[in-house]
Amino acid sequence: MNLQGALIVLGLLVILAVALNAYDRGRIKRRFFAFVEATFGGDRKAGVLPVAGAENVPTADRRVLRPESDGMEAVTDDEVSPDEPFGSIDFICFLPSETVNGRDEALGIYKQNEYVIDKPHRLYGQREGTQSWSNLVRDRGHVRYGLLALALQLADRAGPVNESDLNAISQIGLKLADALNRPTRFNMTFEEALERAAALDKFCSAFDVIATVNVMAESAPVFRGPAIERAAQEAKLEFGAGNIFCRRNEQGGPCRNLYSLANLYQPGFFDPLRMDVFQTQGLTLFMSVPAVPNPSGVFKEMVDAARLLARRLGGRLFDADRKPLSETGLTAIDVQIQGIAERMAAQGIAPGSLNATRLFPP
């Protein structure tokens, strides 16, 4: 083949590569926008995207409550009431002893071996001379423990544990037992753990729900950054993690934030260095229903905050599908939230409890 022919072939290959790359990018883009529209009612022309970089952001696996839905899905009736210090969501290897061990002595062995486990796991200790439990990773080096407990969370958003996970945590427990000269005692058999994990997985799938209220510009063409900051401050929202505003849980407890405020449009978060020139046509307030205490009360507070923002900024309330939110629609969502809270409590994991925040983390 002469030089001219080689150059022609090379040119064709370059054109083909560019075409394939454009096709792949277009296919990915189409799939992405299809997901946005199916899940959030997004408008690709307006650039409406799910909130990026925010806590509790709705995803494909987290349902958003709508006025016309019933808020409920098929839920397991298996008993999941607490029966151990860490509730009913862990497979636990207890390591009792009449003597005590230092924090670093036990934590060193745990840290050397925990890399084999993907599911959430923790090493707890009962502090010397007390009945209180603490996480060794968070304790100071001088703390000493009597009873130790190695815990593997049985389910999370990624699904339930499997037999391989149980084997891995058991092996770490046995290594701790050998090194510290302690016996082992498990809170359940592998069969019981797998059955409980399956029940918790159904529980997570049924109750991982987001409630959201959108505030969109109506009498004003856009919402401007300084006005948003003033209205957010009046609504007791603080700027924080993920560059969004959050309503802190002033009562304390495992749930730190009750609900959040983000930009409805791309990129979702706010740039604190450019708020003086920032503008948007919409804001979104959202809460994780299972992760907050008294979710019906929190929803009502969030609606009040949305109304305040709408008054101050010149906006109107809309639901997740960008339809105007009436009092009837708000009541319908609240009824769904109350039903979710009742079903969760009936199964031994109340909304906003420690176990709920572990199963439904931000």
Image (cartoon, rainbow, N blue to C red):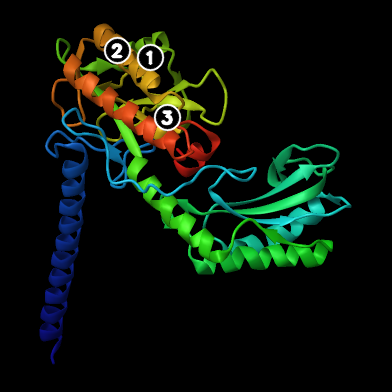
Q: What residue sits right under mark 1 in the picture?
A: 232
Query: Where residue 184 sits in the image (x, y, percent)?
Result: 73, 62
User: Which structural element holds mark 2?
Assistant: helix
Q: Quadrant for the N terminus, please.
A: bottom left
Residue 32, placed above or below residue 211: below
- 3 and 2 marks in contact (CB < 8 Å): no
Query: Mark 1 and mark 2 in contact (Cβ < 8 Å)?
Result: yes
The disc, 2 or 1, on the residue closer to the chain's N-terminal end is 1
Q: Secondary structure at mark 1?
A: helix
Q: In the image, which is nearer the foreground, mark 3 or mark 2? A: 2
Instruction: Please tell me how crowded label 1 is: few (under 14), some (14-19), or many (20+) other residues with Cα within 10 Å.
Output: many
Please name the residue that numbered disc 2 is placed on: 309
Q: Which residue is mark 3?
A: 243
Q: Quadrant of residue 135?
A: top right
Query: Could one spot residue 41 in this view of the protein?
Result: yes
Pointer 3 local density, CA inside 10 Å: few below 14, some 14–19, many at least 20: some
Q: Residue at x 27, y 11 (%)?
A: 307
Q: 263 or 249: nearer the eye?
A: 249
For the residues labelled 2 and 1, the Cα–Cα distance comes to 7 Å
For the point 39% across and 18% down, which residue is it?
A: 297
Disc 3 marks a residue whose amino acid type is Asn
